[in-house]
Image (spheres, rainbow, N blue to C red):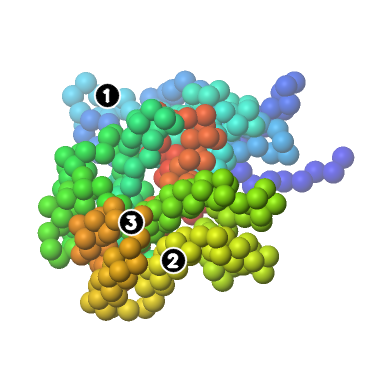
């Protein structure tokens, strides 16, 4: 029979025995090659043996599809320095005394959990649900560890609902350095006080690295950031939230005009306007010849909608251009004049919002910063929630977000 060898790759041990059980599991019994340990009371190095502890059984990486278990009876040592001569059991660095697994197997579990679920990993590995959760809680913190962060650069603030339709909001706080997004917090609720308390807890050395805070127009977020960071840090209202507002106004006008045209046009003529909602939402450069013909037909029957459509595209062009904040402010003010001169009323509410947040909106043009990375993360969180059939525990949600963002770099 052919024989091959696989290195155990566990330091400071010798293999004493290998057994294949009737269930098809491999049990490898090892002994420590290290003599001595440190007294758990005085911390001194001790080397007087005092028997062995109970056999520890640890799940290890599988071999050829077979479950592998490491068995070890740790040596106990007696301290001759302390009163009462206490005994300390030796612990080796390749396992955690609290874990039923070797460290490398715990890492394997965490890697399996990236973009997956606890239940799926439990089934694939033949482990109990709590065993998988145990690996998660041993190695993944439930809140940010500032020690591992060197700088923050751009902070993003946004909210997400834990329960669809229930308004059970949490605030997602992230940072963006170069192309890397880091989860900083999942906060219960979205009040100014809650956000301000967290932002205030950021270590002073990291506060100095913050260049901007990106958010939507929710004043609880913008005011909290302004009060914590002061004038040195720019508060940027995300351009895509701005675009959503004026495009919603265009969509509102479209609904009114389509309702009117449905009554006034013949059935055959009205059919030519099929899919106008989606066509109006597409970038002009991406429209097909057929879609451009649909727009021509629509605008022939609704000049007011054509005017609103062109004004929307004009404002988008301003945000697309590489211009300074002062130039952008002038061009946006010119755009507002065009709207007023056009007689269109559909943008009235948006213009009021524009006037209120003009400084924070035009801060975008300083370094062209957006909270697009936050929106991207929110989409990932929605996937996590669907995948895990909803997560209501915000500490567990933080762990799952962190693992999906960092898991491959940490454990692959």
Question: Distance of mark 2 from mark 3, alpha carbons?
Answer: 12 Å
Q: Is residue 12 above or below residue 178?
A: above
Specify which label sits upstream in the sequence, 2 or 3. 2
Find disc 2 in the rendering and name its residue: 307
**Where does the image place residue 197, in percent across and percent down from the top left?**
17, 42
Question: Distance of mark 1 from mark 3, alpha carbons?
Answer: 84 Å
Residue at 27% over, 59% down: 351
Q: Is residue 348 above or below residue 41?
A: below
Is label 2 or label 1 in front? 2
Specify which label sits upstream in the sequence, 2 or 1. 1
Q: Which quadrant would residue 312 be assigned to in this image?
A: bottom left
Find disc 1 in the rendering and name its residue: 86
In screen coordinates, is 396 left or right of 149? Answer: right
In what element is the residue under mark 1?
loop
Q: Is residue 105 above or below residue 175?
A: above
Determine whether label 1 and label 3 are within 8 Å by CB: no
Is residue 68 visible in the rendered structure shown here? Answer: yes
Q: Residues within 10 Å of mark 1 (few under 14, many from 20)?
A: some
Q: Mark on residue 345?
A: 3
Question: Distance of mark 2 from mark 1, alpha carbons?
Answer: 87 Å
Q: Along the line of sight, which residue is nearer the eye, 124 or 189?
A: 189
Is label 1 or label 3 in front? 3
**Where does the image place residue 332, in percent across and percent down from the top left?**
29, 70
In screen coordinates, is 230 left or right of 28? Answer: left
Is residue 405 visible in the rendered structure shown here? Answer: no
Q: Along the line of sight, which residue is nearer the eye, 231 or 322?
A: 322
Specify which label sits upstream in the sequence, 1 or 3. 1
In screen coordinates, is 225 left or right of 278? Answer: left
């Amino acid at each position: 029979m052919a024989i091959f060898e696989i290195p155990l790759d566990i330091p400071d041990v010798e293999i004493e025995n290998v057994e294949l059980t009737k269930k098809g599991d491999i049990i490898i019994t090892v002994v420590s090659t290290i003599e001595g340990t440190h007294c758990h009371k005085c911390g001194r190095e001790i080397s007087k043996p005092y028997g062995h502890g109970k056999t520890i059984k640890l799940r290890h990486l599988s071999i050829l599809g077979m479950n592998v278990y490491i068995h070890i009876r740790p040596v106990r040592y007696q301290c001759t320095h302390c009163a009462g001569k206490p005994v300390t059991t030796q612990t080796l660095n390749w396992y955690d005394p609290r874990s039923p697994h070797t460290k490398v197997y715990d890492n394997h579990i965490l890697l399996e959990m990236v973009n997956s679920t606890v239940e799926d990993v439990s089934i694939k590995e033949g482990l109990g649900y709590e065993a998988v959760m145990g690996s998660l809680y041993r190695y993944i913190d439930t809140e940010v560890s500032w020690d591992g962060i060197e700088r923050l650069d751009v902070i993003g603030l946004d909210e997400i609902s834990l329960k669809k339709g229930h308004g059970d909001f949490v605030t997602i706080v992230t940072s963006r350095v170069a192309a890397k997004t880091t989860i900083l917090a999942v906060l219960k609720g979205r009040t100014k006080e809650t956000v301000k308390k967290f932002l205030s807890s950021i270590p002073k050395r990291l506060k100095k690295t913050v260049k901007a805070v990106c958010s939507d127009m929710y004043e609880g977020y913008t005011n909290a950031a302004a009060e914590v960071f002061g004038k040195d840090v720019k508060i940027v209202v995300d351009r895509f939230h701005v675009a959503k507002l004026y495009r919603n106004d265009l969509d509102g006008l479209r609904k009114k005009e389509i309702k009117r045209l449905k009554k006034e046009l013949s059935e055959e003529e009205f059919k030519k306007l099929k899919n106008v909602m989606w066509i109006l939402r597409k970038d002009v450069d991406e429209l097909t010849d057929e879609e451009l013909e649909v727009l021509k037909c629509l605008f022939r029957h609704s000049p007011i909608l054509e005017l609103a459509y062109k004004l929307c595209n004009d404002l988008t062009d301003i945000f697309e251009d590489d211009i300074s904040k002062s130039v952008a402010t002038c061009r946006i003010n010119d755009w507002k004049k065009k709207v007023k001169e056009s007689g269109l009323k559909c943008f009235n509410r948006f213009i009021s919002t524009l006037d209120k947040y003009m400084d924070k909106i035009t801060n975008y043009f300083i370094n062209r910063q957006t909270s697009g990375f936050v929106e991207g993360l929110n989409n990932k969180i929605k996937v996590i929630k669907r995948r895990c059939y909803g997560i209501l525990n915000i500490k567990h949600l933080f762990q799952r977000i962190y693992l999906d963002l960092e898991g491959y770099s940490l454990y692959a």
